[in-house]
Amino acid sequence: MKITGKINKIYRINSNSVLCDVASFDKLKEGGTVDLPNEAAEQLLNMGVVEKAKSTKTKKELTNG
Amino acid sequence: MADTRVVAANSVYYGLKAETSFGVALDSTGADGTAYLTQPVVQAQKPVFNIQRESRLLSGRGSVKNAADTITNLRGGTVTMPFEMLATPRTLAQHMFLVGQENGQSGSIAHEMEIDGSSNADSIGGTISSGIPHSCNLAYYGMGAAEGIKVCGVVCSDVTISGDIASNNGLLSISGNYFSGFSNPVSTSTALEQTFDGTWVARESTYFNILDADARTLDIEGNASQTFIMKSFSFNISNGINRVGFDTNGNAEVYVFPEYTVTGEISIKWDDEFDYGAANNVVQNFLDGNTSSLAIKIGDGTVSSEGEVNILAEIQYTGDPGQDISESGIFHTIPFECVQNSSTEAFKITTFKNEAVTAW
């Protein structure tokens, strides 16, 4: 699941106490988006310190002929 | 040879788990497999059994009491236990519930406890529905199998919430006392020599930092919501609990909460918003008996993530503000009590924990 960190909230979380790996956690603390296993993502979502990443679907270009 | 076993101070721990029937053990089938919520204390204090003991020197016994003339009565007593810990999202919400016997939930999930003269339970002891009203089994353990103590019907008689930038690294702490009217050990309730073999829920590791308190406002004289610079604050919430009645084991049938009181103290800086001048005079505010709205919000005020809490209180000074004089300047130390003011709650605390009460 892709999640995005909330900069003003996630800093309160002890990175050693969550399922998220350190590199991903660091990225979340900077407000970045990471793709985590569902269990790890759900844990942070439950804490209210991340949000589900907004999907950025790209439209397929129509090709003529 | 004497036994060499040592029980280290921090090897003993305790946990809480909400009851589904007042004063009844969640698991009384031998070893207790309940998944207790481990409490994040540094050192767990032992539950104290306050029972009645009668001892008389009867006539004709000579000059010392006789062993036959003492009576120990386990019925009608109480069990108490002090606690102190850094507040975590669940512990803060649950302990507010245990002392205030009121819980409102909104969103996913902000827990609100208010003291307003009508929402808080006057008594408990009847049916428990979805964790309301709230009483717990308390498990004191860690020293060895069959040495644990289980106390049922546990609520809080008082809880103090404290925040001080100069202690605990600015982290919010809670302390107080647990209370139970189930002092007579029986197989289905309070029990000694108990083994706990459930998988306990781990301690939380998110805290509340008062240095995150972005919104701090207090009314002063006619000026509403003046922003203050804070050094420390505390709120003491007490419910005056009494145990009433006796079941077939002599344990309580009802707890009565005759009066909820909230008192406290806050230390704020002497500056242009809180001084001894016209319109911002802390002494005049006391002399006038003004009621002032106090708000302390740790976080952005939305209470939407762990580590955030809003405290709103309607305070009236209970004494002339004193002074805390240090190299940081002069601070007003304002003692107060919280009072209901029309529809404004005497005290209201909202904190975030994305768990229903039934999970506690």
Image (cartoon, coloured by chain):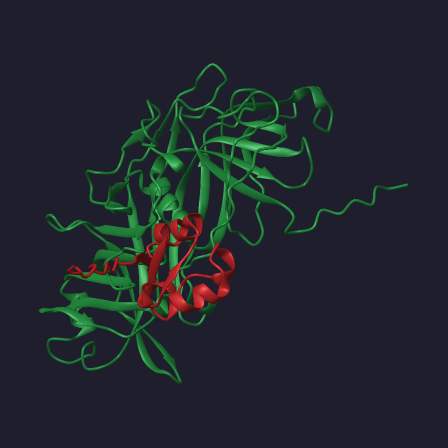
Chain colours: A red, B green
Quadrant where the C terminus of chain B lies? top left
**Looking at the image, which residue sits at the far right?**
B1
B270 relative to A49, above or below: below
Q: Position of residue B333 (x, y in %)?
A: 31, 70
Residue A49 in view: no
Residue at left offset 46%, top offset 57%: A20
Which of B23/B244 is in front? B23
Kindly indicate the quadrant of the structure image that contains residue A3: bottom left
Vertical side of B113 occupied by A30: above or below: below
Q: Residue B337 at what x, y percent from top left?
A: 26, 55
Against B19, residue B16 (above or below) is below
Quadrant where the N terminus of chain B lies? top right
In the drawing, does residue B350 fall left or right of residue B34? left
Q: Is residue B157 visible?
A: yes
Residue B46 image-quadrant placement: top right
Residue in view at x 59 percent, y 33 percent: B149
Picture coordinates of residue B120 (x, y %)? 25, 38
Horizontal relation, residue A34 to residue B279: left or right: right
Going by the picture, which residue comes out furthest to the front?
A65
Residue closer to the observer: A41 or B253: A41
- Image location of residue A41, percent across then percent down: 40, 53
Q: Nearer the viewer, residue A39 or B295?
A: A39
Give the tally of numbered discs.
Answer: 0
Q: Residue at x 26, y 79 (%)?
A: B270
